[in-house]
Image (cartoon, rainbow, N blue to C red):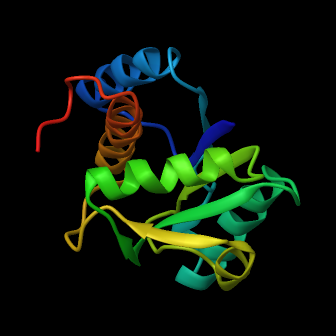
Amino acid sequence: MKITLICIGKTDDQHIVKGIEIYTKRLKHYVNFQIVTIPDIKNSKNLSENQQKEKEAQYLLKNISNQDYIILLDERGKEYSSVEFSNFLEKQMISSVTHLVFMIGGPYGFDDSVYQRANAKISLSRMTFSHQMVRLFFVEQIYRAYTIMRGEPYHHE
């Protein structure tokens, strides 16, 4: 199985970039993982919320195929403990899913067209985090999930 994280806008904070790099490098031992960064929408200040979400949706949907299993990182999504999330990933691995794509939307969330295409929604927390922090938290949780699957001593219950 391949896992892709698609997000909008680059990460500016070098501390966050470094953290993401650390976990992305660690993940290479477990799964084919990549991050696809879609550039920020140009002239977004001149667009309404809905117009910005529509533009972002065009770019997000252009980066997936019909066979991809799409999961949105969304505040209204299902919440998992780390062990439950690991079990979820493991179920995807043993099912027919070959490409699992997680998406982080822009500052206003996702357009309806993206919600309609999605197979599931996951919430990392009921709290709100910056889009840059979500990337780091999520990549760490993917790594944690794989160490749980393998029974490695990274996660403690």
Question: Residue 57 sits in which quadrant?
Answer: bottom right
Q: What residue is rendered at 51% in x and 68% in y?
A: 45
Q: In this view, does 154 lie above or below 155?
A: above
Residue located farthest toward the left when viewing the structure as drawn: 157
- Decide which of 92, 99 is in the foreground and name it: 92
Q: What residue is rendered at 58% in x and 72% in y?
A: 120
Q: What residue is rendered at 76% in x and 44% in y?
A: 98
- Decide which of 74, 44 is in the foreground and name it: 74
Question: Residue 58 sits in which quadrant?
Answer: bottom right
Q: Is residue 116 above or below residue 84?
A: below
Q: Position of residue 130 (x, y in %)?
A: 29, 55
Q: Position of residue 155 (x, y in %)?
A: 19, 34
Q: Position of residue 15 (x, y in %)?
A: 23, 25
Say whether residue 92 is left or right of residue 84.
right
Question: Residue 35 sits in which quadrant?
Answer: top right
Q: How many numbered badges does the structure rendering display?
A: 0
Q: What residue is rendered at 28% in x and 23% in y?
A: 152
Q: Is residue 50 above or below residue 62?
A: below
Residue located farthest toward the right when viewing the structure as drawn: 66
Q: In this view, does 78 lie above or below 149?
A: below
Say whether residue 12 is left or right of residue 97.
left
Q: Could you tell me which quadrant the N terminus lies in?
A: top right
Q: Where is residue 144 in the image (x, y as percent from the top left)?
A: 32, 35
